[in-house]
Amino acid sequence: MMNLFSRSGDQLLDVRLPRRRLAAGIATTLESGQRIIMLQDITEKRELDSRREALIRAIAHDLHNPLSALTGFADLVLKLGTLNEQQNRFVTRIRQTTSKLYEMIEPLVDLAWMEAGMPLTHVPTQLAPLIDRAVAELGALALEKQITIAVSVQDPLPVIMGDPERIRLVIYHLLHNAIIYSDREHTVAIHAWGDDEELFCSVADRGMGIADDELELVFDRMYRSRDERVRDTPGGGLGLTISKTIITRHGGDIWAASNLGEGSTFTFLLPVVRL
């Protein structure tokens, strides 16, 4: 607490309170020289975050391996088993259901992996091939909604130092969100550019848009918008959290801009490496 009084300039510090409470302390100095300090009790928020993290770790650990085994056994039975038509239909249903469950928990595994501080691969990386891969992976989804993915990449594009698979995952999540939250027959645009210092990549859609008071919240773990249209769209609210975690661990930044009802643009930047 005394640190907020003794230092100059703007500060944000955690402050321990009596009875094991925790507060976020914000301090600023006025032109008159007076020091203003505001405290907000964040005990419940931190406890909730801790419970969410524990839940994510538990789900990622306890469900990932059994589902992988079920999927593998179902594939084996379909390939080698002597099944009648009804049995084949049942095993196929098992395979489809376990695959869907696996897709649902995969983001939890990614988030648990990142938040555990597992090491990233750092190699010289070109963004253009990662964009191409993400676009190809989402081609079927875009086709289903008759959405065009417009790609614009600066040539040549600066090289970054990073983990290619994790950065590809960021692009995938941003594109996936842009597609599922867009109306049919619209265009989703991905643009990459940079200079000697930074590389930028943006994904823009003409979908539902995001309310101003929710722009900073969309990166929070498991956050879902109040908008009923968004809540009716399948998703676990983890893609943007994972993306922010990955970009932050690469020393970059990610943000959103939006007009409600007109669409959104998500942009990330990464530092450029000079080879």
Image: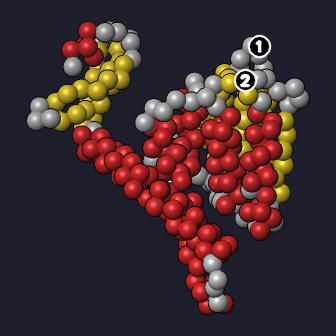
Q: Amino acid at mark 1?
A: Leu
Question: Is disc 2 placed on a helix, strand or loop?
Answer: strand
Q: Give whichever of 166, 35 is nearer the camera.
A: 166
Q: Left or right of 63: which side holds 254?
A: right
Query: Percent position (x, y) of residue 75?
Result: 62, 69
Mark 1 sits on what residue?
A: 275
Q: Amino acid at mark 2?
A: Pro
Residue 265 visible, this orientation = no
Label total for image? 2
Question: In which quarter of the view is residue 91 placed?
Answer: bottom right
Question: Is disc 1 placed on a helix, strand or loop?
Answer: loop
Q: Give whichever of 66, 97 is nearer the camera.
A: 66
Query: Percent position (x, y) of residue 118?
Result: 48, 33
Toward the right, the furthest residue is 155
Q: Left or right of 124: which side holds 214?
A: left
Give the residue displayed 84% in from the left and 36% down from the top.
Answer: 153
Question: In which quarter of the view is residue 207 placed?
Answer: bottom right
Quadrant for the N terminus in the image: top left
Q: Give whichever of 214, 274 is nearer the camera.
A: 274
* Disc 2 to disc 1, C-alpha distance: 8 Å
Mark 2 sits on what residue?
A: 124
Query: Percent position (x, y) of residue 35?
Result: 29, 15
Query: Percent position (x, y) of residue 195?
Result: 78, 20
> Disc 2 or 1, which lies upstream in sequence?
2
Give the residue displayed 10% in from the left and 35% down from the top.
Answer: 19
Quadrant for the C terminus in the image: top right
Q: Is residue 35 above or below residue 51?
A: above
